[in-house]
Amino acid sequence: MRRLLSLLITVFALAALPALAAKPAKTATAVFAGGCFWCMEHDMQGVPGVLKVESGYTGGHVNNPTYRDVTSERSGHYEAVRVTYDPAKLDYGFLLYRYWKLVDPTDDGGQFCDRGPSYRPAIFVSSPQQRAIAETSRTEAARRLKTGRMVTPVLDLKTFWPAEAYHRDYAKRNALNYQAYRLGCGRDLRLKQVWGG
């Protein structure tokens, strides 16, 4: 009887393993605007602990906005990315540190060669904890600037609207066009001026 009971426990334990293994790890999200979402998506994807980066729109008043709505400047939306990450491997503070190195936080008229309200940098927060960390990070980043003054805001996140499919993973799918755009836009040169290095 004891042997049968032991066998049944082992069978039930083995049967439960796939369900336990399939259970997703706890994840967290962060939303950042930093000019062209192709560049933000590309540069955030390589961070260890980042699980997914999605291009999209947020901060405006139009539901289900399209790229045309956003670039027309009538929607109030920013081009942004939603970063899904594993908080056991990566914390929000490090993502913020990475974010600052990807933007010119002294320019509220757009970013690099992309001009207009939809290309402004901003951090969108979804909790009081995120706000506190983001505000502290903003203060620290302002001290590290080599030129200009901090103008990038920390804003409350409302709805994040995913961008159209043709914008997603643009840098991976169109590597040559993306590199030509990035070089022509002067993004990396300006980042060296702002942050040094």
Image: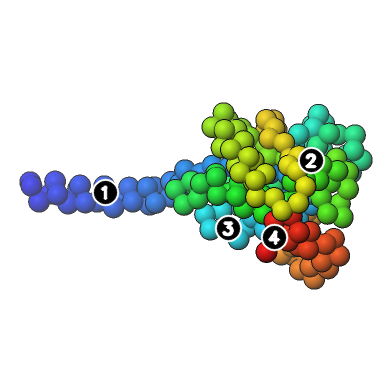
Q: Few, some or many C-alpha atoms within 10 Å of disc 1 (few <14, some 14-19, many ≥20)?
A: few
| Quarter of the picture holding the C terminus | bottom right
Residue 142's image quarter? Answer: top right
Residue at image mark 4: 196
Q: Position of residue 151 (x, y in %)?
A: 76, 39
Residue at image mark 3: 47
Which colour style is shown?
Answer: rainbow
Q: Position of residue 146 (x, y in %)?
A: 71, 53
Residue at image mark 2: 78
Q: Position of residue 54 (x, y in %)?
A: 68, 49
Q: Nearer the observer, disc 3 or disc 1?
A: 3
Q: Few, some or many C-alpha atoms within 10 Å of disc 2 (few <14, some 14-19, many ≥20)?
A: many
Q: Position of residue 188 (x, y in %)?
A: 76, 62
- 100 vs 78, left or right, is left
Query: Type of residue at label 4?
Result: Gly
Q: Few, some or many C-alpha atoms within 10 Å of disc 4 (few <14, some 14-19, many ≥20)?
A: few
Q: Nearer the observer, disc 4 or disc 2?
A: 4
Query: Type of residue at label 2?
Result: Tyr
Which mark is drawn over residue 13? 1
Relative to 147, residue 155 above or below? above
Sequence-earlier tag: 4 or 3: 3
Sequence-earlier tag: 4 or 2: 2
Sequence-earlier tag: 2 or 1: 1
